[in-house]
């Protein structure tokens, strides 16, 4: 049995299921991989939208990277985790009053502005923060989750021109630009095309406004392989392109924002089999988790395209050959969640051995866009436990709360009877 799987079983023994478990060593390794393979002048931000667990942020802050946030809650988490304010990048289509109130205490945090309307609002607020303008791509995105020229986000060409007066009078402190065209890029060539397009529109916008950009956030969106047959991203090709960009725009800071690439492969979603069922003529099992805790928000079709979950019991660790360790043939099996929802399917037609109640299923690559993108309150469900493990050291990040915890911050309505 592998070391990681032993740790997962120990986590289940201590904290039960459903539980999210995060491999701290894998988190650190992903950061180190980027540092090894990307040019030294590239700054990395962690996008909290992928997973805003405080413990995850603690680890990544300790690795020395920055934070990309898009809400007041994410901003509060980044501050609590100790990310330096000058390494915090605040994005999103509009900044709500609570976010603006926090930014007054963080004058070095960079604000990404999504529209001329938002830029005017920030000018009226007299915030001193440095600002970058998010530019809508004028090129096609090759990302699985695209945010290209048809996206709702960012300035288009004529929008940039309309801001010349505010910028020239220094009513706002515009220091650069931000371009993001999608996430889950699976080919290095697709990322290179994005980088070239992002740089081109940034330099055109700089000429239009008459500024020399001091910061360019060129997005990110690096993908990870969810299926066993998919390949890891070739960072060497990306490195070569980034090295050219660093030389071309020096001394401007070049920033990449990455979420899924940093945390997805460090996470496991652990569930237990409750009983048997059938679904569309296939054998199926019902587990104590579901899509309310691991939604496929990004539309990656994980239920059909991801690798099968690992089946674990004390002393047994299944490998995915044509036969399991007991010699029984693997059978297409569906893993159904515990919700009263037809679409609550975690895995479809996965090749699995005969499963029994009590078997633990460990879904790999679950560290990004799991619980943090899920309809977690559906059915009044309490949140699952979250646990970090660093080798054999196991730390609880979030306790699983009892079912009645959903009532904690609710209030009765005083209903009085009335005559019919």
Image (spheres, rainbow, N blue to C red):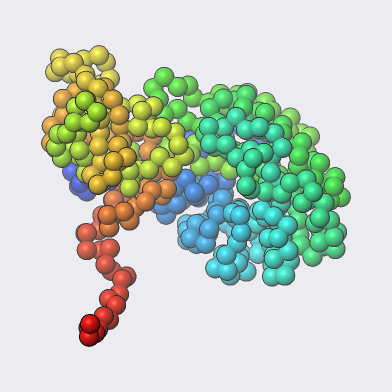
Q: Quadrant of the C terminus?
A: bottom left
Residue drawn at x 54%, y 68% is 98
Residue 159 horizontal side relative to residue 35, left or right: right
Q: Where is residue 234 drawn, in percent x and y? A: 56, 23
Place residue 191 in its image quadrant: top right
Image side of residue 133 versus residue 270, left or right: right
Q: Residue at x 47, y 45 (%)?
A: 50
Picture layout, residue 324 above or below residue 343: above
Residue 268 higher or lower than 324, as above or below: below
Which residue is at the far bottom? 419
Q: Is residue 9 visible?
A: no
Classify the position of the N terminus by image quarter. top left
User: In the image, what residue occupies the spot 21% across and 15% down?
Assistant: 323
Number of labels in the image equals: 0
Quick one: 105 or 341, which is closer to the camera?
A: 341
- x and y percentages locating residue 140 in the rendered image: 66, 32
Residue drawn at 33 percent across, 47 percent down: 293
Residue 68 location in percent, x, y? 56, 50
């Amino acid at each position: 049995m592998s070391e990681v799987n032993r740790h997962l079983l120990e986590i289940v023994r201590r904290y039960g299921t459903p539980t999210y478990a995060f491999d701290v060593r894998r988190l650190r390794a992903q950061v180190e991989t980027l540092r090894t393979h990307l040019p030294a002048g590239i700054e990395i931000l962690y996008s909290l939208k992928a997973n805003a667990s405080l413990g995850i942020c603690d680890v990544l802050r300790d690795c020395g990277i920055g934070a990309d946030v898009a809400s007041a809650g994410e901003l509060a988490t980044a501050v609590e985790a100790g990310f330096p304010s000058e390494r915090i990048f605040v994005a999103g289509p509009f900044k709500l009053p609570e976010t603006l109130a926090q930014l007054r205490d963080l004058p070095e945090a960079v604000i990404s502005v999504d529209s001329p309307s938002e830029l005017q609002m920030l000018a009226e607020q007299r915030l001193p923060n440095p600002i970058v303008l998010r530019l809508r791509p004028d090129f096609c995105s090759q990302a699985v989750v695209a945010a290209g020229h048809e996206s709702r986000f960012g300035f288009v060409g004529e929008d940039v021109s309309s801001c010349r007066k505010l910028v020239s009078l220094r009513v706002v402190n515009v220091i650069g630009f931000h371009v993001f065209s999608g996430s889950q890029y699976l080919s290095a060539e697709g990322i290179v095309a994005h980088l070239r397009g992002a740089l081109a529109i940034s330099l055109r916008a700089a000429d239009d406004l008459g500024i020399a950009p001091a910061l360019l956030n060129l997005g990110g969106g690096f993908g990870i392989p969810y299926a066993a047959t998919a390949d890891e991203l070739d960072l060497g090709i990306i490195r070569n392109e980034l090295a050219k960009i660093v030389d071309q725009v020096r001394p401007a800071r070049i920033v990449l924002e990455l979420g899924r690439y940093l945390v997805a492969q460090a996470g496991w979603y652990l569930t237990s089999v409750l009983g048997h069922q059938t679904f569309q003529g296939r054998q199926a099992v019902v587990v104590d988790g579901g899509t309310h805790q691991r939604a496929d928000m990004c539309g990656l079709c994980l239920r059909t395209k991801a690798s099968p979950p690992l089946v674990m019991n004390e002393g047994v660790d299944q490998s995915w050959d044509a036969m399991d360790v007991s010699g029984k043939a693997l059978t297409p099996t569906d893993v159904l969640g515990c919700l009263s929802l037809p679409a609550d399917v975690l895995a479809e037609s996965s090749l699995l051995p005969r499963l029994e109640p009590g078997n633990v299923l460990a879904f790999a690559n679950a560290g990004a866009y799991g619980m943090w993108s899920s309809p977690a309150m559906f059915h009044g469900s309490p949140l699952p436990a979250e646990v970090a493990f660093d080798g054999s050291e196991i730390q609880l990040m979030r306790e699983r709360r009892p079912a009645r915890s959903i009532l904690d911050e609710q209030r009765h309505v005083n209903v009085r009877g009335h005559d019919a």
